[in-house]
Image (tube, rainbow, N blue to C red):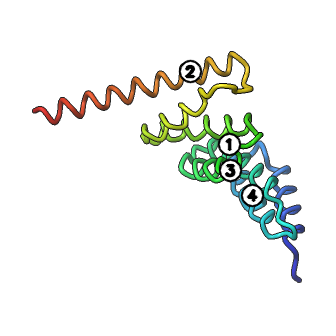
Amino acid sequence: MRTNHGDRYSFLVDAYDEQELCNPLLGGLLLEQAALCCLYVNPPQFRKFNMHLVFAGDRFRAAGQLEHSLGCYKAAHAAYHGRRWMLLDDHTSAAIARSSYYLNDIDRATEYAANLLAEGSPAPANVQSSYLREFVHILQVSMAAITLSQCAMSE
């Protein structure tokens, strides 16, 4: 029996709903596959695809799968960045910055954390303050790494 992508999408989302709290890794996989189904329906549902990628990234991060969550966030960020979806843009930028930081990609973490400090952000003041603290921390780590590499080169 052949099923269409809409049926597969419904099956995957229902399966995710049943086990949501039990296994974040399985939840991430189900949501990622559901997102892909959104690309194969006619017409393709790009917003739903990106929304499910963000949700999948959140689940992968909860499961400790930072590389996989980073891939989901980066794919979704490409769709949201520079558009009217500023809170989603901020969410994906923050997630990319944090994941990159924990994966020791300080340059990428700095770049995405800096994006969060753009003028006109709709984020509340307490959230912006948190973004600023994270950015300063990333800069401090970056400066410490530069100092260590300079000391190592001078020896």
Most extreme residue toward the bottom is 1
Of residues 34 and 14, the one nearer the viewer is 34
Q: Is residue 75 above or below residue 99?
A: below
Q: Is residue 16 left or right of residue 142?
A: right
Amino acid type at circle 2 is: Leu
Q: Quadrant of residue 2?
A: bottom right
Q: Amino acid at mark 1?
A: Gly
Mark 1 secondary-structure assignment: loop
Q: Amino acid at mark 3?
A: Ala
Residue, disc 1:
82
Q: Which residue is mark 3?
A: 76
Name the residue beneath numbered marker 2.
Answer: 132
Q: Determine whether the residue tagged by mark 4 lies in a helix, strand or loop.
A: helix
Q: Nearer the viewer, mark 2 or mark 1?
A: 1
- Which sits earlier in the primary sequence, circle 4 or circle 1? 4
Q: Nearer the viewer, mark 4 or mark 1?
A: 1
User: Sequence order check: which comes first, mark 3 or mark 2?
Assistant: 3
